[in-house]
Image (tube, coloured by chain):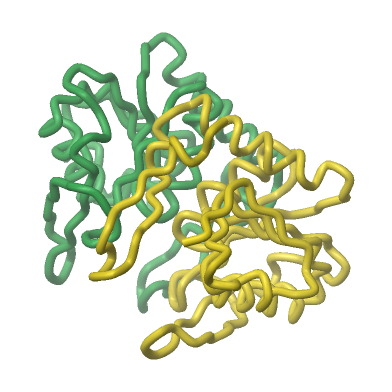
Chain colours: A yellow, B green
Amino acid sequence: MDWKEKIRTIPDFPKKGILFYDITPVLQDPIALEQTISQMKEKYSNEKIDYIVGVESRGFIFGSLLAEKLGVGFIPVRKKGKLPSKTIEQSYALEYGTATIEIHEDALKAGDRVLVADDLLATGGTAQATAALVQRLGGNLVGFCFLIELSFLNGRKKLEPYHIESLVQFDQ
Amino acid sequence: MDWKEKIRTIPDFPKKGILFYDITPVLQDPIALEQTISQMKEKYSNEKIDYIVGVESRGFIFGSLLAEKLGVGFIPVRKKGKLPSKTIEQSYALEYGTATIEIHEDALKAGDRVLVADDLLATGGTAQATAALVQRLGGNLVGFCFLIELSFLNGRKKLEPYHIESLVQFDQ
């Protein structure tokens, strides 16, 4: 699969000067979508995994598909105020201001082995906050799996020493 | 699968007096999740379907899983301002104010057969707006598939004469 052919770039979204990598053509094409999830599974085929965590919203797509492919449960991480039961929360810095995400307190037990799946690794802020949530519940974070890595943003460095896999990398 | 055992109710969420049906225990349990998607597939096994549409955010989970199970593409409908390419939008009434959702203009072609999947049918406002988006692009809306139907809210009536399926119904 030539991901660079399948992923569409949109200039100046969400704002001037940003080149947005649009994964909707991958979702629309059942073969591309199936290959994405199979390749994600392949990257962690030697690991025991209990749960996939996916972050709202696009992480819900890749996370739940990967969970189903591995035959494990899916745990949603959501923006503050969306999960109905008792949660813990984690804030992180954005370019302007902060964001807060949450996980249900009873989503996992100490020692559960967790993989985080998402569409895109940019600066790594969301991923780092997600890792913190998993660890605060006692989860064992096996690693991260992304469809796209924007390597020029150095998100990988922020997530060290976690295991990080991505299916396609963009240098600019 | 006894869905009523698996779906957790949370009183007073998101506000006083509302009983919230929490599907996270279904997601967490790989057998329950697999059965949900298999039963959704079964409901439309006699229909030709080209795409599953899922609405942000929980519809992304059920929609993408059902698309993968059927071997068809997935099309996301998102809150206004989130989809990067050219979109059409549809507004609908909430209890207070309005909400606006969007679909990419090139997400489907005239005549494509589309099924909408989501976790919950409540008053049907989001579902009705999603149907309007699909129809405005010339799509042929095969029907809706929900995990939960809150039958006391009469969403089904709002979506007539579309074909509506749900796996579990709550009367209060």
Residue at 27% over, 58% down: A11
**Is residue A78 toward the left or the right of residue A41 in the image?**
left
**Residue A80, horizontal then vertical, whole percent:** 46, 78
Quadrant position of residue B100: bottom left
- Name of the residue lying farthest toward the top: B46
The reply to whether residue B108 is visible in this rendering is: yes
Q: Is residue A30 above or below residue B125?
A: above
- Name of the residue lying farthest toward the front: A171
Quadrant position of residue B39: top right
**Residue B26, horizontal then vertical, whole percent:** 62, 48
The reply to whether residue A133 is visible in this rendering is: no
**Is residue B149 toward the left or the right of residue B84 in the image?**
right
**Is residue B66 toward the left or the right of residue A128 in the image?**
left
Instruction: Identify the image quadrant of the N terminus of chain A.
Output: top right
Q: Is residue A101 above or below residue A20?
A: below
Between A123 and A51, the one lying in front of the other is A123
Between B163 and A30, the one lying in front of the other is A30
Residue at 55% over, 26% down: B69
Counting labels gives: 0
**Residue B98, horizontal then vertical, whole percent:** 13, 64
**Residue A140, horizontal then vertical, whole percent:** 83, 68
Residue at 30% over, 25% down: B114
Q: Is residue A12 above or below residue A44?
A: below
Residue at 54% over, 53% down: A148
Quadrant position of residue A94: bottom left
Between A37 and A83, the one lying in front of the other is A37
